[in-house]
Image: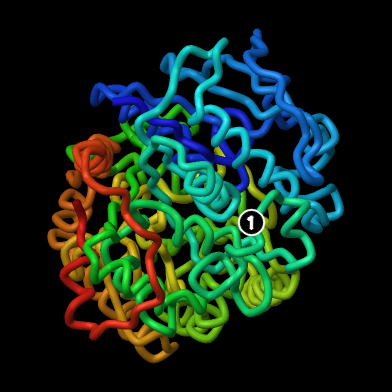
Amino acid sequence: MSVLFVTSEHAELVKAGGLGDISAALPRALRDEGCDIRLLMPAYPAVLAKVRPVTIVAHRRGRGAIPPYLIGATEVSGGVPLYLAIAPTLFQRDGSAYGGPDGLDHADNDIRFACLSLAAADICAGLPRLGWRPDILHAHDWVSGLAPAYARWSKLPVRTVMTIHNIAHQGLFPYERLHDLCVPADSFRTDGLEFHLHGSFLKAGIFYSDHLTTVSPTYAEEITEESHGGGLHGLIEGIAAAGNLTGIPNGIGEEWNPRHDHYLPVRFDQTDLEAKHEVAELIRTALCLEPSEGPLFGIVSRLVHQKGFDIVAEVADRIVAKGGQIAILGTGDPQVEAMLLDLSRRHRGKIGLMVGFNEPMAHRIIAASDFFLMPSRFEPCGLTQMQAQRYGTLPIAHRTGGLADTIEDDETGFLFAPLTAERLSEAIDRAFAVFADPDRFDAMRRTAMAKDFSWSGPARAYKALYGRLTDETSKPAQRPHSLVVVPKSRTAAAAKVA
């Protein structure tokens, strides 16, 4: 079974968020399961600086406003083949994968990622020098959303899977760009990629793919609802009712393991948790927190509205009054950063904030903390709640998305709903009560650390899905999904883990 995995990030090469972690770990796990999986991503400067050699396997002419580009071949760790879409005018730029040094998105991101999607379609069509063609095209998030569409429009013999990592990011472009992106004019309609008089990369991927997945069973159900569906809930509800939506939780890699984490000054496991205290003292010193026998609450996150830190600010006085401390690491929205900075100044010695991202410090805060705060408004899957549990740090989280699927309330953490300061305070009070009962606290931590969050389970689920799709290749081609709204009772059973 051969799979082309199309992504814009890879943690070993260039990373902006969780997609980078997933793009590095899931292909390796699928390869271990026997899949012939190969990656495709843009040739950013950081990528070209880290991979050598690159063999050019195709020269492609420009189409629309997309300039001529090359397709190169190399590999990443684990022997996973990597193909690169090489277009210097599009990808050889300073800044992140998506924007410049000023933090703003590139104005031509639609052209840039249409190029990536066209390269995917070229590989699926067959390149003579490559000598390989996938059975499955697996696109990830809006950046590769046009790949299933190009494959459908070209009538390529490949089955397509689209994974939504966060429906809030949709990749919208003006109607006037249709020709520039080589998008057929007749696809700009409700039953197509039109979205409120714009084109949507994400909707194209959802509409034209054979199967839709997302990164947890609960989030799969939530995106069929108006409150979480980003305006696409009607379309997704119809897909779920047809049995073509699957929620598969992410995993975490072995680099998140307290037994051999090289970022920690001391290692530990569930048989000996005393070393957590040593890491906690290191964090208290680093963040100018006072010595304390009380619990340490950790936060490692993007500092944005989605993560609910305005609710944390409302309950911070209560945490401090009960003898707790908070260690915060993250960067993001300047307003959220300023709010948390003010909070740390008001509680000097009790709340420590480090603005920015530092991988060693992320590992150390997660390892040092007793509890981990995740009051996210929505969370498609989340990784840090799984990382925290692996380190014996009990998450306190809003019951939503992947948080609801990966935390057992009062067993491996504390869940609360709805998202209010009152309900979060109640969950924090439960955490303080557990902290005061050492036997129960240690039992919960050991239960959390014993959970299997490896990538082997998700890889098996994806392999089974790929197998079902390839088994269907002899059947008549599936028609594009229509915007059908169905009763909620019909979608709940459809949005389950494979």
Residue at 34% from the left image edge and 36% from the top image edge: 258
Residue 386: % across, % down: 33, 51
435 or 252: nearer the eye? 252
Q: On the picture, is 334 further left or further right than 80?
A: right
Residue 364 visible at all: no
Residue 104: % across, % down: 81, 58
Residue at 31% from the left image edge and 29% from the top image edge: 30
Residue 10: % across, % down: 55, 34
Check the image and tell me how it is coloured.
Answer: rainbow
Image quadrant assignment for residue 1: top left
Q: Secondary structure at mark 1?
A: loop
**Dot 1 alpha-carbon crowd within 10 angstroms: few under 14, some 14 to 19, many 20 or more:** few
256 or 252: nearer the eye? 252
Q: Is residue 348 above or below residue 23?
A: below
Q: Is residue 393 above or below residue 117?
A: below
Q: Is residue 455 above or below residue 189?
A: above
Q: How many marks?
A: 1
322 or 198: nearer the eye? 198
Residue at 33% from the left image edge and 53% from the top image edge: 211
Q: Is residue 282 above or below residue 131?
A: below
- Name the residue carrying label 1: 184
Give amino acid for label 1.
Pro
Residue at 57% from the left image edge and 30% from the top image edge: 122
